[in-house]
Image (tube, rainbow, N blue to C red):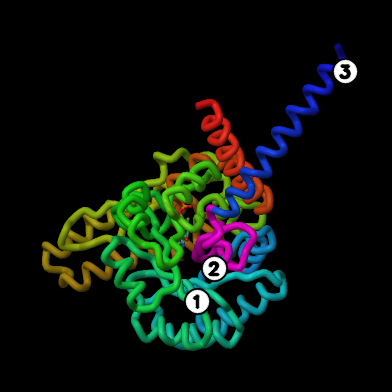
Amino acid sequence: MTDMLATSATATDDANSVARQTARAELNRLWSAGTAFLGTEYAILGGAMSWVSERTLVSAISNAGGFGVIACGAMTPELLEAEIVATQARTKKPFGVNLITMHPQLDELIQVCLRAGIGHIVLAGGIPPSAAIRGAKDGGAKVMAFAPALVLAKRLIRMGVDALVIEGAEAGGHVGPVSLTVLAQEILPHITTVPVFVAGGIARGDAIVGFLEQGAAGAQLGTRFAAATESIAHPRFKEAFLKANARDALTSVQLDPRFPVIPVRGLVNDGSQNFLTHQAETLRRFQAGEFSKEEAQLEIEHFWAGALRRAVIDGDVETGSVMAGQSVGMVKAVRPVEDIIGELVTQAVDALVHRSGQRREH
Ligand SMILES: Cc1cc2nc3c(=O)[nH]c(=O)nc-3n(C[C@H](O)[C@H](O)[C@H](O)COP(=O)(O)O)c2cc1C
């Protein structure tokens, strides 16, 4: 009897192991366009995060089989070059560089990337200039850009972009108004010529599988990696992530339509409250004739200057900008990048095993 039980347990183990291997092969097939494009084991990008995505985190993500992306932010060409060299010293795996299109030295930054042999340049912060796309591609790099709507996705492809990221409003940082659920339905069925990566609100591997089955080539995550062990973010920044729920990660509020505020998603704190008071006071001074319209707009825009650095580097989570996506509610512990990626892959495989089991039952 004991022998029979042992034999049947072994048979179940074998069947489970075959099911997992099959599911793993299926995952590899589902995200093959993404892994081929990135040159990675997994089609998981660590979304560039200003002040956070530097040499340590980027190399950890790439070394763990994902694709790290340096956030150039406002860096000078010299600083970016140093960051790339330091990252290359930490990983032999591919990684990318995210450049903000409004940067006054965009062309020089692209040349820095090309000279350093960066294979993938991500152009963020609006529709990139054609010359930037051409310059990067002529120098041998692949170009990725963000598509906030289907018409813009098609335009970017016509402009020569090699892959797209669609980032839903659930994401941390600067966001558009549309959720990933809607962007995915609007864009994924219609874009088949370039890989499309999904971003915003993703914290689990089963969710990644869902988007891959809809046609995505892979997923980009930011918030989960910001709280990783290797992230240089201040312990108080990570602690704020662990305590927060999804509903704490809100977009900045605009008080008056005459003075637009670019929506940024982050944890609500004294800073976000003070921003409302600051806008109200600026409006009052504009109405009293103390500020011109341009001065008032600048006054509002300057409120957050340096605030992300203050939160990430100095740990001022009370008045700094604690950018975080709604996925922050699923960040439960500070964990090494390898564990985070390993867990995402396990969850993805589990989901596929579960589905194939359900199919057999029907
Ligand atoms: C702290 C923080 C800073 C960010 N900075 C940038 C940035 O400089 N450039 C950019 O393209 N995206 C930036 N993002 C967006 C991420 O690259 C990524 O797309 C987003 O975090 C994905 O959504 P998730 O946070 O729900 O995973 C930032 C996000 C966070 C949380």
**Disc 3 crowd, CA 10 A, few/some/many (<14, 14-19, 20+):** few
Residue 273 on image: x %, y %: 34, 48
At label 3, the amino acid type is: Asp
Badge 3 is on which residue? 3
**Residue 118 screen position, x and y as percent:** 58, 79
The magenta segment is 30-54
Numbered disc in front, either 1 or 3? 3
The verdict on label 1 being within 8 Å of ligand 1 is no
Q: Does the segment drawn in magenta span residue 41?
A: yes
Check disc 1 and report the residue beneath it.
142
State which quadrant residue 356 falls in: top right
Residue type at mark 1 is Lys
Q: Is residue 97 above or below residue 175?
A: below
* Vertical order, 83 against 234 (above or below): below
Relative to 90, is 260 above or below?
A: above
* Rendered residue at 32%/61% (across/down): 148
